[in-house]
Image (cartoon, rainbow, N blue to C red):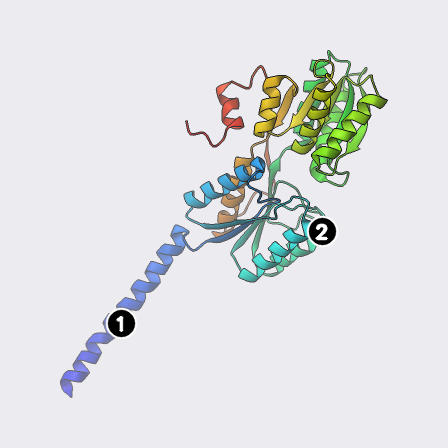
């Protein structure tokens, strides 16, 4: 009986030591970041959408660097706002420590974004802002400045006498609005500049193609077009190429898809504003990790864009922007 008691008393400190060791290991794991759970919800998870796949690559790189678990999701189409809302609802139910969200609509995503905050989940918004700013931080391209750069590039190509048409996605998009405001601001500096108007293609290449053909038929004085996203750029380029107007109509776009790069090489697309989607994904996850660690995120991180032309597209720095997945 005495031996049994002696064994029990010997086990007590051992059990206490084991419990302390488990707590210590748990603390080390927390500090290493392995239990940091982040869900990234993009506008599109379509593998053919190079912009969002580059955002994904940046998010994955940050998750690996900061030892966090990042689950990356998104609807197939950028226009499927309701599916994205459902994905956010599902993410809330899974209770991650942080959500990184690229809202497909600045208004419709606000209620579910507020639910994220109410659930005690950190929220980082990337790419497009939300009305009322219901997030802990915002990371996106500086679209106003990108618009200015696009306007100045076109003014230079048309020798300071641009007659410009703008092809956008939709009038309610904050991203498109900032870009257009920047374009108009830059063109206003050139007194002879004339903006024929803005047309909307609802993120559909065919609509952009038809709108461009109609614009060029109605306004033969147009010598420049600025397209505010990839689909608009591709649709406009198709129409300009078909009408044999590549020399007389200078086309400036946004994006760096393989199709746009080919159009640059052909001389159909004269310049494109290249964003840094890798940085957006990387900084989004990095900010989420910092919030989980109890640090404050920057209220807004602006990422600059670069004007890439046929003449400078082979510069080493621009090659890195155009081909972000190529190891050097």
Give the x, y percent position of residue 186: 73, 22
Tally of marks: 2
Q: Nearer the viewer, residue 109 or 229?
A: 229
Residue drawn 58% across the image and 51% down it: 123
Give the x, y percent position of residue 17: 26, 67
Label pair 2/1, CB-CB below 8 angstroms: no
Which residue sits furthest bottom? 1
- Which picture quadrant has residue 142? top right
Residue 232 in view: yes
Tell me: residue 258, above or below residue 285: above
Q: Nearer the viewer, residue 93 or 287?
A: 93
Which residue sits furthest left? 3
Give the x, y percent position of residue 177: 74, 35
Judging from the image, what secondary structure is the residue with disc 2 in?
loop
Q: Nearer the viewer, residue 23 or 262?
A: 262
* In this view, the mark in front (2 or 1): 2
Which residue sits furthest top? 159
Q: Quadrant of the C terminus?
A: top left
Residues packed near mark 1 inside 10 Å, few (<14), some (14 to 19) or many (20 plus): few
Q: Which residue is mark 2?
A: 108
Residue 295 in view: no
Tell me: residue 214, above or below residue 6: above
Q: Nearer the viewer, residue 105 or 46?
A: 46
Residues packed near mark 2 inside 10 Å, few (<14), some (14 to 19) or many (20 plus): some
241 with respect to 67 (left or right) = right
Q: Which mark is residue 189?
A: none
Q: Which mark is residue 15?
A: 1
Q: Find the distance from the CA under tag 2 to the CA under tag 1.
A: 54 Å
Residue drawn 45% across the image and 45% down it: 63
Which residue sits furthest right? 218
């Amino acid at each position: 009986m005495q031996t049994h008691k002696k064994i029990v008393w010997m086990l007590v400190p051992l059990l206490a030591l084991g419990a302390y060791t488990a707590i210590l290991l748990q603390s080390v794991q927390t500090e290493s970041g392995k239990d940091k759970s982040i869900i990234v919800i993009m506008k599109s998870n379509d593998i053919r959408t190079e912009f969002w796949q580059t955002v994904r690559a940046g998010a994955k790189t940050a998750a690996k660097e900061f030892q966090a678990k990042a689950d990356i999701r998104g609807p197939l189409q950028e226009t499927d706002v309701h599916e994205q809302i459902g994905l956010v609802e599902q993410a809330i139910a899974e209770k991650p420590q942080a959500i990184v969200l690229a809202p497909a609509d600045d208004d419709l995503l606000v209620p579910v974004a507020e639910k994220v905050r109410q659930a005690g989940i950190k929220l980082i918004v990337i790419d497009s802002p939300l009305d009322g700013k219901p997030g802990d931080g915002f990371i996106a391209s500086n679209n106003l400045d990108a618009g200015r750069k696009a306007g100045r590039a076109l003014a230079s190509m048309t020798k300071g006498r641009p007659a410009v048409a703008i092809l956008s996605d939709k009038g309610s998009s904050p991203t498109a609005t900032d870009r257009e405001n920047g374009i108009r601001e830059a063109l206003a500096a050139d007194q002879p500049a004339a903006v024929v108007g803005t047309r909307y293609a609802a993120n559909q290449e065919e609509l952009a193609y038809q709108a461009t053909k109609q614009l060029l038929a109605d306004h033969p004085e147009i010598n420049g077009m600025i397209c505010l996203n990839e689909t608009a750029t591709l649709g406009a380029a198709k129409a300009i190429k078909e009408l044999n107007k590549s020399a007389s109509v200078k086309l400036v776009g946004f994006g760096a898809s393989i199709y746009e790069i080919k159009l640059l090489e052909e001389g159909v697309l004269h310049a494109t504003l290249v964003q840094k989607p890798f940085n957006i994904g990387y900084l989004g996850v990095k900010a989420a990790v910092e919030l989980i660690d109890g640090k404050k995120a920057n209220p807004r991180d602006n990422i600059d864009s670069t004007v890439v032309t046929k003449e400078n597209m082979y510069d080493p720095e621009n090659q890195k922007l155009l081909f972000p997945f190529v190891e050097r």
